[in-house]
Amino acid sequence: MPKVYLAPMAGITDRVYRRLCFEQGCDGATTEMVSAQGYLTAPPDRNAYRFLLARFPEEGPLAVQIFGSEPLFLAQAAARLTELGSFSSIDLNMGCPAQKVVGGQSGSALMKDPELAAEIVRQVKRATPLPVTVKMRLGWDAEHRNAVAFARALEQAGADMLTVHGRTRQQQYAGKADWDMIGRVKRAVSIPVIANGDITDGKTALDALKTTGCDGVAIGRAALGNPWIFAEIKAALAGESYSPPPFSQVIDTALRQAREMAEWKGERSALLEMRKHFAWYTAGRRNSAQVRTRVNLASSFEEVEALLRTLE
Ligand SMILES: Cc1cc2nc3c(=O)[nH]c(=O)nc-3n(C[C@H](O)[C@H](O)[C@H](O)COP(=O)(O)O)c2cc1C
């Protein structure tokens, strides 16, 4: 059966949200991305890393994603993260398009330097007994769609699995993901390849698997406010029908996420962080825009609950 993964999303794929996805049948998830250099130089009790690296024991397989451009730092970070004993694999970010990341020659900028990318994989492999996977794109821009050669170089360097987002860095998140090209990457290597980009429901998951021949799919934006997408795709893979949860259950889940977040990070931070999640959970419902404006001004969990319960 093909695997259905939650794609890494900075600011979103924390342990509370991941657990909701695992409960719906997600086969594996990734932490938010962590700077290798930042992690190595931070004091061990720094809050940001405590939160970024936290996991619940009942989560399924969890990769920790690191970014950087210095093979030595990435290898040292991988070794230290392995010692925590929380992660089942190390994922290297070679896909992030953000200026502050590519400016440091990290993320998708590594696709312009396949030798350095391969050296990173080799050194990280030597530093950890865990599988080492890579999240990549199709290339830097339309003139440099080098994903096939890049994937081969990473496989030779020892990468254990690749997740390919079917866009170039230049495209950021615009245009349509090119699943045909993901299929070319899949056929060029013998390690597992996971297709990513624009998979939004059971049907598109089946289409993407058929077009690419990949070993699984990774779901990003379509999982926002919708952890049930994993149950939906699992049902489609099994040839079973799927019915979405009633809206009352959607609101229960949003409130549960908020409560668990509040227990973890305090009510104030939780309400701030949850604003975007509330917007995703309630998108498209009647009066949701007005309710969201008031939710964003609310200062207690009880107030938010009362507001969300007015939606139908
Ligand atoms: C808000 C947001 C944050 C993201 N953060 C990361 C990240 O930290 N690491 C990473 O490899 N990809 C990151 N991505 C990219 C996603 O993992 C995924 O490749 C992309 O959204 C395409 O898949 P989708 O069409 O299913 O959303 C992020 C995407 C979004 C929308």
Image: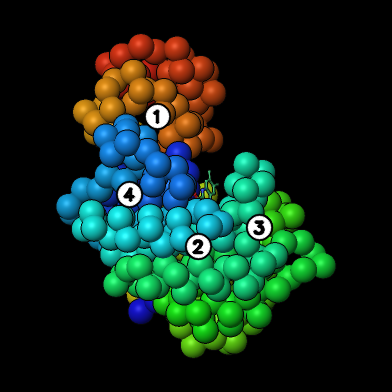
Report the disc number at residue 274. 1
Q: Nearer the viewer, mark 2 or mark 3?
A: 2
Q: Residue furthest left?
A: 57
| Residue 231 in picture, x, y percent from top left | 34, 60
- What residue is rendered at 27% in x and 34% in y? 45
**Residue 292 vs residue 149, the one in the foreground:** 149
Earlier along the polypeptide chain: callout 4 or callout 2?
4
Label 1 secondary element: helix
Quarter of the image for the N terminus: give it. bottom left
Check disc 3 and report the residue beneath it.
Answer: 109
Does mark 1's beta carbon lie closer than 8 Å to ligand 1?
Answer: no
Quarter of the image for the C terminus: give it. top left
- What residue is rendered at 50% in x and 79% in y? 157
Decide: few, some or many residues near mark 4? Use Cα within 10 Å; few <14, some 14-19, many ≥20: many
Earlier along the polypeptide chain: callout 2 or callout 3?
2
Q: Amino acid at mark 4?
A: Arg
Q: Is residue 280 visible?
A: yes
Does mark 2's beta carbon lie closer than 8 Å to ligand 1?
Answer: no
- What residue is rendered at 73% in x and 70% in y? 145
Q: Amino acid at mark 3?
A: Ala
Q: Amino acid at mark 2?
A: Pro
Earlier along the polypeptide chain: callout 4 or callout 3?
4
Earlier along the polypeptide chain: callout 1 or callout 2?
2
User: Which quadrant of the structure image shows residue 60?
Assistant: bottom left
Q: CA distance from mark 1 to mark 4?
A: 14 Å
